[in-house]
Image (tube, rainbow, N blue to C red):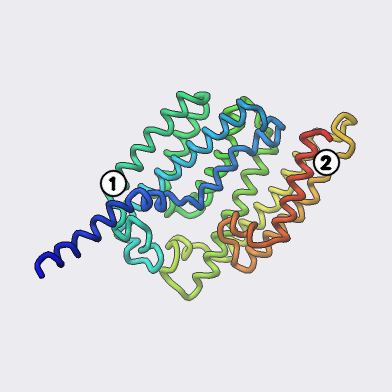
Amino acid sequence: MDHRPVEATRAPHQAVDAGLPAALIRTARPRQWVKNVLVVAAPAAAGQLFSRHALTQLVVIFALFTACSAAVYLINDARDAEADRAHPTKRHRPVAAGEVPVPVAYAVGGGLVVLAPAVAAWLCPLAVAALLVAYLGMQLAYCVSLKHVLVVDLVVVTTGFLMRAMAGGLALGIPLSRWFLITTGFGALFMVAAKRYSEAVRMTGEPGATRALLTEYSTGYLRFVWQLAAGVAVLGYCLWALEGGAAPHSGLLPWRQLSMAAFIVAIPRYAVFAERGTAGEPEEVILRDRVLALIGVVWLAMYGLAVARW
């Protein structure tokens, strides 16, 4: 009779201890790691993706950005643990649910904050290490205060995407075209603002169901931001595609210029989901809509042919 309650109280602690690594991984948001694939953007655009050196560097940078984002998520969840416990969905996060103790989340997150730039300085050019330090500083500032500042929160999230896209180019010494930076930056802002707009539409009549800052944005303002960003991204891409002209040695067909058609169609297609209020995570939108996924494949094929000069 006396042993059973003791065993019953020990079993949950043993289960938590045994599941701590898995809980830490869940806190690091593995589904978000796909965003780090953006590190291949600049090398792919320059046609320098498939050398052994390039692939090695890009794998390392992908892993480093994954470690950095994991550190930010761990520290963010540790800071917000009390507030998350009162939230209808965030209370299931491992830190809020008690699966990951707050000190452990801080310790692992802090360790990754130190480790990632140190490894980058060892294995990559110093510019990449500096970029990671800037990324971590910006993201940690976002966790502490910037996520509560109107407009700045959109800029910080967008800049995080842009930094990922820049990292591959910096690692391989690839000059970053101004049109590449404009297209990538405003394309990211389009998706970020579309996601915020969708969240604002869904939260109508449901106070506290999502991030508090959204109550200070109007849906009209967020629609204006994603529409503006979409227009600039399309213009930037067209100027980028036309930058090299249609020189005879560029291939049988001007694939780079033809890829503008797929890009221009993709933006309004994505905007359909933004307008409906169903534009959540970009990867989920693309995978959920077969037409948009097909447009993406066509665009990749066209740009691949342009890079290969076929």
Horizontal placement of 158 versus 253: left or right? Answer: left
Contact (Cβ within 8 Å) of mark 1 with mark 2: no
Residue occupying image coordinates x 67% and y 62%:
289
Residue at x 28%, y 55% (from the top left corner): 16
Residue bearing the label numbered 2: 255
Rendered position, 291 above or below 101: below
Residue 8 versus residue 38 in the image, above or below: below
**Amino acid type of the residue that numbered disc 1 sits on in the rendered structure:** Val
Describe the element under mark 2 as helix, strand or loop: helix
Residue 151 lies left or right of residue 112; in this view the side is: right
- Comparing marks 1 and 2, which lies closer to the viewer? 1
Task: Tell me if 91 is positioned left or right of 209 in this view.
Answer: left
Dot 2 alpha-carbon crowd within 10 angstroms: few under 14, some 14 to 19, many 20 or more: many
Quarter in which the N terminus is drawn? bottom left
Give the numbered dot on residue 104. Answer: 1
Residue shown at 63% from the left, 58% from the top: 287
Q: Nearer the viewer, residue 22 or 234?
A: 22
